[in-house]
Amino acid sequence: MKKLIKAVRNRLKRVYERLHNERFKNNLLLAIPFWIASGITGLVAVLYAKLFSLAEMGTEWMVHHGTWLLFIVMPVCFITAWWLVYKFAPAARGSGIPQVIAAVELATPKYIDKVKKLLSVRIIFFKILSSIVMVFGGGVVGREGPTIQIAGSVFRAVNQWLPAWWPKISKRNMIMAGAAAGLAAAFNTPLGGVVFAMEEVTRTHISYFKTALFTAVIIAGLTAQGLLGPYLYLGYPDVSNLSTYIFFGVIAVGVVTGLLGSGMARVILSIMKWTRSLTSIPKRVLYITGCALALATMAFFVSVSVLGSGKEIMTHVLFTGDKHLPWYMPLMRIVGPVLSFTTGAAGGVFAPALTAGASIGAVMGEWFHVSPTNVNLLILAGMVGFLTGVTRTPFTSAILVLEMTDRHNVIFHLLLAGMVASLVAYLIDRHSFYDHLKMQYIHDVHHEAIPVEEETVVKEG
């Protein structure tokens, strides 16, 4: 009997070890695609950031040698950026975040074939090319939203390239992890990437994909840091010795930026709805030319600060003693994204929204006659509020600005600004900017308004 018990015990031990090894092997195979995709995302994000920076330097060179050149270069660049998207990758237009959100919703057995219209290798190439041309021409666009669509496309491509015998990975989880990795690599904000994936991209409970999500964020972020070094997107603004009553200023800034951010999004959506009726190419080119010339006119006669993503405005008001901005700067930083985004070229609204909010905070801080450190806080609150007005993601906005500046002592101020902005934004529109665009992309995909792109990789399924 003892020998029988021992034999059974040994047999059970061998079975357990075999099952344990199989489980380890399966988990490893499931993790490898996320590691590979995250590393590629980090590399592409760094390359994209370098190219974007070179394009902005090209704009500065052009302005330095003659602002009048904008009247020639801007229309050419705007039209070229639009044509690249229109001709070769229609789903690459705009920010890229709505496309990723739509792809997550479509990543079901019934509609999985439609995801390739929104995320693909071709979109990566033309997303980068179109936005680079746009920013060289002075377009008021950012690279953060495009990086998220690029990352989603990278993760989908890696998932698609897996051989048939590989353990099946949830396509939805793959895309969601890609979105988080893209934002983390673009802003160097890992927590922001995680919160963004949960708050904006999907409402799936984190327990279903937490390992993949954190792995993607960590690897993509470390890859970007390894090449660019550890850095903060903005730096360390001084927010010490704050007044006790500054909470009232934060609330006021939250109200104004929430209304204006949501209002800007509403105007962009209305213009985009109108431009969709411009079915003929000459009419569309005429509109794009008008946008470019209007922006060039503002730059020539008012201020060149209307051009580009506006990061230099944020760094100037946060890190110099000169907190003054003209009263019209917020208006210019709102009109700029409207003229740029509605052209149909590639480019995001994250960075322009942050700049618009920063300019509002600086102007209101001067109106309130508060100390420079209090003005810095109102600038950060304005960034959170305006971005929240556009995206309706107060926690993501607050965490992003927190990680960009490493100012943990004002986390409650930033959360307050985000929550106030989110509440008042509903007075303008009950849905976020990305929600509206997401529904439009889903509609276009179902009605073949976005053509299917031919792919040279192994077909899914």
Image (spheres, rainbow, N blue to C red):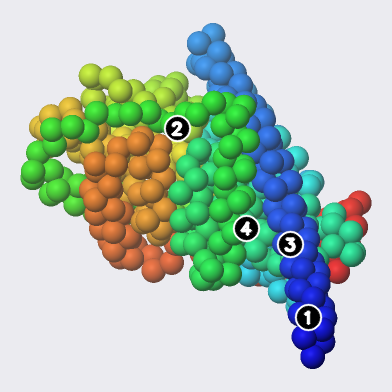
Q: What amino acid does circle 4 point to?
A: Ala
Cβ–Cβ below 8 Å for labels 4 and 3?
Answer: no
Q: What amino acid does circle 2 point to?
A: Tyr
How far is the residue under mark 4 from the one under mark 3?
Answer: 16 Å
Q: Nearer the viewer, mark 4 or mark 2?
A: 4
Query: Circle 4 sits on which residue?
Result: 212
Q: In this orientation, which residue lies closer to the viewer: 91 or 65? A: 91
Q: For the residue labelled by badge 3, is the local secondary structure a helix, a strand or a loop?
A: helix
Query: Circle 2 sits on which residue?
Result: 233
Left or right placement of residue 163 versus residue 234 in this view: right
Q: For the residue labelled by badge 4, is the local secondary structure a helix, a strand or a loop?
A: helix
Cβ–Cβ below 8 Å for labels 4 and 1?
Answer: no
Q: Nearer the viewer, mark 1 or mark 2?
A: 1
Q: Which residue lies at the image location 23% right of the left edge and 19% below the top edge? A: 321
Measured as percent of width and height from the top left, residue 451 is found at: 80, 59
How far is the residue under mark 4 from the one under mark 2?
Answer: 25 Å
For marks 3 and 2 on the same chain, the one whose residue lies earlier in the sequence: 3
Q: Which residue lies at the image location 82% right of the left edge and 84% below the top edge? A: 3
Query: Circle 3 sits on which residue?
Result: 24
Q: Which residue lies at the image location 91% right of the left edge and 51% below the top edge? A: 456
